[in-house]
Amino acid sequence: MPCFLVILLTAAAAAEVMDKEPSLSEIWMAAALAAVLAWFLGRRFPRLGCLALVPSLPVLMVVEESYDKFVGQAIVREAGPGYIAQAHLAIGLVLLAYASGLTRRPGVAR
Protein backbone atom coordinates (compact mmCIF):
# COMPACT_ATOMS: atom_id res chain seq x y z
CA MET A 1 0.00 0.00 0.00
CA PRO A 2 2.73 2.61 0.77
CA CYS A 3 4.35 1.93 -2.63
CA PHE A 4 1.05 2.58 -4.38
CA LEU A 5 0.66 5.86 -2.47
CA VAL A 6 4.15 7.01 -3.49
CA ILE A 7 3.46 6.18 -7.14
CA LEU A 8 0.11 7.95 -7.00
CA LEU A 9 1.58 11.12 -5.48
CA THR A 10 4.52 11.35 -7.85
CA ALA A 11 2.40 10.67 -10.93
CA ALA A 12 0.48 13.89 -10.28
CA ALA A 13 3.64 16.00 -10.37
CA ALA A 14 4.21 17.47 -13.81
CA ALA A 15 7.64 18.73 -14.74
CA GLU A 16 7.47 22.22 -16.16
CA VAL A 17 9.89 23.30 -18.83
CA MET A 18 9.78 27.07 -18.59
CA ASP A 19 11.17 27.20 -15.06
CA LYS A 20 14.40 25.84 -16.55
CA GLU A 21 14.49 28.23 -19.53
CA PRO A 22 15.60 31.88 -19.52
CA SER A 23 12.88 34.50 -19.45
CA LEU A 24 12.29 36.82 -22.40
CA SER A 25 14.00 39.69 -20.59
CA GLU A 26 17.07 37.50 -20.03
CA ILE A 27 17.03 36.48 -23.68
CA TRP A 28 16.89 40.07 -24.91
CA MET A 29 19.55 41.26 -22.43
CA ALA A 30 21.91 38.50 -23.54
CA ALA A 31 21.16 39.27 -27.17
CA ALA A 32 21.77 43.00 -26.68
CA LEU A 33 25.11 42.34 -24.97
CA ALA A 34 26.08 39.87 -27.69
CA ALA A 35 24.99 42.31 -30.43
CA VAL A 36 27.18 45.10 -29.06
CA LEU A 37 30.09 42.69 -28.77
CA ALA A 38 29.42 41.31 -32.27
CA TRP A 39 29.34 44.80 -33.78
CA PHE A 40 32.60 45.75 -32.05
CA LEU A 41 34.32 42.52 -33.05
CA GLY A 42 33.06 42.82 -36.61
CA ARG A 43 34.34 46.35 -36.76
CA ARG A 44 37.79 45.86 -35.20
CA PHE A 45 38.60 42.14 -35.27
CA PRO A 46 36.46 40.47 -37.94
CA ARG A 47 38.05 37.03 -37.50
CA LEU A 48 37.00 36.90 -33.86
CA GLY A 49 33.31 37.33 -34.61
CA CYS A 50 32.42 33.89 -33.27
CA LEU A 51 33.32 35.12 -29.77
CA ALA A 52 30.16 37.22 -29.89
CA LEU A 53 28.14 34.05 -29.58
CA VAL A 54 29.47 33.39 -26.06
CA PRO A 55 27.14 35.88 -24.27
CA SER A 56 24.25 34.63 -26.38
CA LEU A 57 24.60 30.99 -25.29
CA PRO A 58 21.31 31.03 -23.32
CA VAL A 59 19.52 32.22 -26.44
CA LEU A 60 21.24 29.61 -28.60
CA MET A 61 20.20 26.92 -26.13
CA VAL A 62 16.54 27.99 -26.38
CA VAL A 63 16.71 27.96 -30.17
CA GLU A 64 18.34 24.53 -30.13
CA GLU A 65 15.80 23.14 -27.66
CA SER A 66 12.92 24.51 -29.72
CA TYR A 67 13.71 21.93 -32.41
CA ASP A 68 13.54 19.02 -29.97
CA LYS A 69 10.48 16.85 -30.50
CA PHE A 70 9.40 16.85 -26.85
CA VAL A 71 11.00 19.90 -25.27
CA GLY A 72 10.09 22.20 -28.15
CA GLN A 73 6.44 21.23 -27.96
CA ALA A 74 6.45 21.74 -24.20
CA ILE A 75 7.98 25.21 -24.57
CA VAL A 76 5.37 26.20 -27.14
CA ARG A 77 2.61 24.80 -24.94
CA GLU A 78 3.79 26.70 -21.82
CA ALA A 79 5.17 29.95 -23.25
CA GLY A 80 3.53 30.16 -26.64
CA PRO A 81 5.02 30.39 -30.12
CA GLY A 82 6.02 34.02 -29.52
CA TYR A 83 8.72 32.88 -27.10
CA ILE A 84 10.39 30.77 -29.77
CA ALA A 85 9.98 33.51 -32.39
CA GLN A 86 11.60 36.10 -30.12
CA ALA A 87 14.53 33.77 -29.40
CA HIS A 88 15.08 33.40 -33.15
CA LEU A 89 14.81 37.18 -33.62
CA ALA A 90 17.35 37.73 -30.84
CA ILE A 91 19.89 35.51 -32.62
CA GLY A 92 19.10 37.36 -35.84
CA LEU A 93 19.90 40.63 -34.06
CA VAL A 94 23.33 39.33 -33.09
CA LEU A 95 24.08 38.17 -36.63
CA LEU A 96 22.81 41.45 -38.08
CA ALA A 97 25.01 43.44 -35.68
CA TYR A 98 28.04 41.41 -36.71
CA ALA A 99 27.28 41.95 -40.39
CA SER A 100 26.79 45.65 -39.71
CA GLY A 101 30.16 45.82 -38.01
CA LEU A 102 31.77 44.19 -41.03
CA THR A 103 30.36 46.66 -43.55
CA ARG A 104 32.39 49.73 -42.60
CA ARG A 105 35.67 48.91 -40.95
CA PRO A 106 38.11 51.75 -40.25
CA GLY A 107 41.34 51.69 -42.22
CA VAL A 108 40.03 49.36 -44.92
CA ALA A 109 40.30 50.76 -48.44
CA ARG A 110 37.12 50.65 -50.48
Image (cartoon, rainbow, N blue to C red):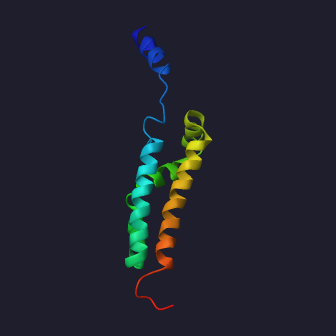
Vertical arrangement, residue 9 with respect to residue 36, above or below? above
Q: Residue 30's spot in the image, x, y percent?
A: 41, 53
Closer to the camera in the image, 1 or 84: 84
For the image, the number of numbered tags is 0
Vertical arrangement, residue 5 with respect to residue 67, above or below? above
Q: Residue at x 60, y 45 (%)?
A: 69
Q: Answer with the quarter of the image where residue 10 lies.
A: top left
- Asked whether the viewer can see residue 56, the reply is no
Q: Residue 61's spot in the image, x, y percent?
A: 46, 51
Closer to the camera in the image, 65 or 38: 38
Closer to the camera in the image, 49 or 25: 25
**Apparent side of residue 48 relative to residue 96 in the rendered image (left or right):** left
Q: Residue 84's spot in the image, x, y percent?
A: 57, 46
Q: Answer with the quarter of the image where residue 80 lies.
A: top right
**Apparent side of residue 23 relative to residue 78 in the rendered image (left or right):** left
Q: Quadrant of the N terminus?
A: top left
Q: Residue at x 54, y 60 (%)?
A: 92
Q: Residue at x 56, y 33 (%)?
A: 78
Q: Residue at x 40, y 88 (%)?
A: 107
